[in-house]
Image: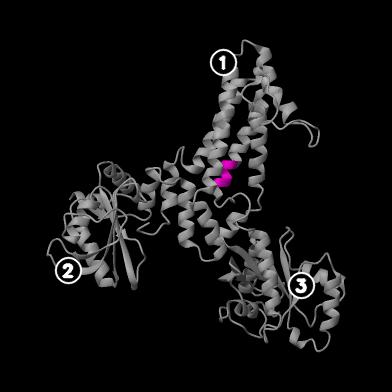
Amino acid sequence: MALSGALRLPPRCRWAQRLSSAAWGDTIFALSSGHGRCGVAVIRASGPGSRGALQSLTGRPELPPPRVLALRRIRDPTTAETLDRGLVVWFPGPHSFTGEDCAELHVHGGPAVVSGVLRALGRLPGLRAAEPGEFTRRAFRRGKLDLTAAEGLGDLIRAETEAQRRQALRQMEGELGQLYRRWSETLTQALAHLEAYIDFSEDDNVEEEVLSQGEGRWGGREGSGAPHPCCAPTPDIATPLLTADATVRALEKEIGAHLQDGRRGELLRGGVHAVIAGPPNVGKSSLLNLLCQRPAAIVSPVAGTTRDVVEVALNVEGYPLVLSDTAGLRHATDPVEQEGVSRARDRLQQADLVLAVLDATVVPSEPTGLGDALGSILPPTACPCILVLNKSDLLRGAEGALRATCAQEDSMPPITLLSCKTGEGLDRLLQLLAQQLAQLCGDPLAGTPSLTQSRHSLHLGDCAAALAQYRQQRGRDLALAAEQLRLARRHLGRITGQVGAEDVLDIIFRDFCIGK
């Protein structure tokens, strides 16, 4: 009865129930290596019952040395039947992924073996199957990683390209979290300085001098001879070195630069959305099929064949590309085609990159006409573009004049001639695509880590707004100014999970696979 009642609870309530039972010491288990036939499958258990589970399944009271693989016969503790012969590992807490006692069983990856071991674990008292992302959630709760590192781990599991892997690994290793914690510590120092000055507000001269000292030490023009704050001699009245004003001003600039990264991290994480657009019958669907090397879209000599948006995911030089084929842009009379054209224009408005396709045999060769033809395709908002002049195999000697015209136009986007029929020009197009993707996504290993989640941008924007409010309140009421610094620090803490993590935990971990 109790079990059926628990199963009727909504997912959020079941999470709360299980988290409360976790405080009593429940143990979870799951297949961690993914489903399907494979050479080796890894089954993981975490919690205080992991020791007993390992002893029960191996039939031995002694455990192998910590973090050392040991060959054992794995039995069903209920029937004593041998399930497999594999390797076992013991990770005593807190030196484990979750920070709890953990055990791993490395068994053969056949479905019968895996299901047999999982059933045996499920019959042990105090053990239950893990929820998606629960191992990582426990690691977060025990301080083994912060929310940004947990998000990086999820991105690493889902990474499909080299650039995605590099970015996710960098975030999982804590670089993004370290950046935000450093900013939070900077705010804590500034707040401590400010509150100390408020405590000694009887001496108005001290307060005014300390708060305005940043103007002389940080506000001067570059090359003015003002010493760096870490090197400049500091009068006793202004100890410690960094004053609240100077610290906030420097941090505000750093956060502003971090926010203005062109969404590089988000584009790399989710893929650059590129739209193939152009008039009917210029070879847009043929281009999609050529790039993905399969007949993903229907190709027909009849204009207006493509009505709906056809989308494929590609890997171009390690960068993720989500490519959409759309209906030909023209004034349509058929209601279905009108809807297709409307969807095509909507996709163009949302695109990160446009592949504008024109027929090379009819496009004007003079710069003005070529620009007008391109302008009829591109949305009014600025968007990176590659102009593809298709059907170059039909030019019959006019190719040279068109190439010369394109090369002379510096104001035009990158242009390439292509024949979707013969494949000539494909290498050049892929080269241009890779260049555009590298500019949009950047190098994931260069500079400071990029923003990868919209919630990071949201909280950083709120943090920057609080810092701006601090500057406005400083001249009026120092107590209100200090409250703005506390608010800015809380927003940073929400990114890493130091503050108010409960409301986002389910959202972050729901997309994890079971066993992670």
Give whichever of discs 2 and 3 has the lower sequence position.
Answer: 2
| Residue found 55% across the figure and 46% down from its top | 456
Q: Which kind of residue does numbered mark 2 sit on? A: Thr
Residue underneath mark 3: 415
Give whichever of discs 3 and 1 has the lower sequence position.
Answer: 1
The residue lying furthest to the left in this view is 79
Q: Position of residue 490 (x, y in %)?
A: 52, 35
Q: Separation of disc 3 and disc 1 at Cα?
A: 66 Å
Question: Which label is found at residue 82?
Answer: 2
Q: Which residues are magenta?
A: 456-460
Q: Mark 3 or mark 1: which is in front?
A: 1
Q: Residues within 10 Å of mark 3 (few under 14, many from 20)?
A: many
Q: Which kind of residue does numbered mark 1 sit on? A: Asp
Q: Position of residue 201 (x, y in %)?
A: 61, 13
Q: Which kind of residue does numbered mark 3 sit on? A: Ile
Q: Position of residue 9 (x, y in %)?
A: 29, 49
Residue underneath mark 1: 199
Q: Residues within 10 Å of mark 1 (few under 14, many from 20)?
A: few
Q: Separation of disc 2 and disc 3 at Cα?
A: 66 Å
Picture layout, residue 458 above or below residue 437: above
The residue lying furthest to the bottom in this view is 396
Q: Splitting the image into 4 quarters, where does residue 386 fall? A: bottom right
Query: In the rendered image, is residue 194 in sight?
Result: yes
- Location of the C terminus (image quadrant): bottom left
Callout 2–callout 1 Cβ contact below 8 Å: no
Q: Overall secondary structure of the magenta stretch?
A: helix
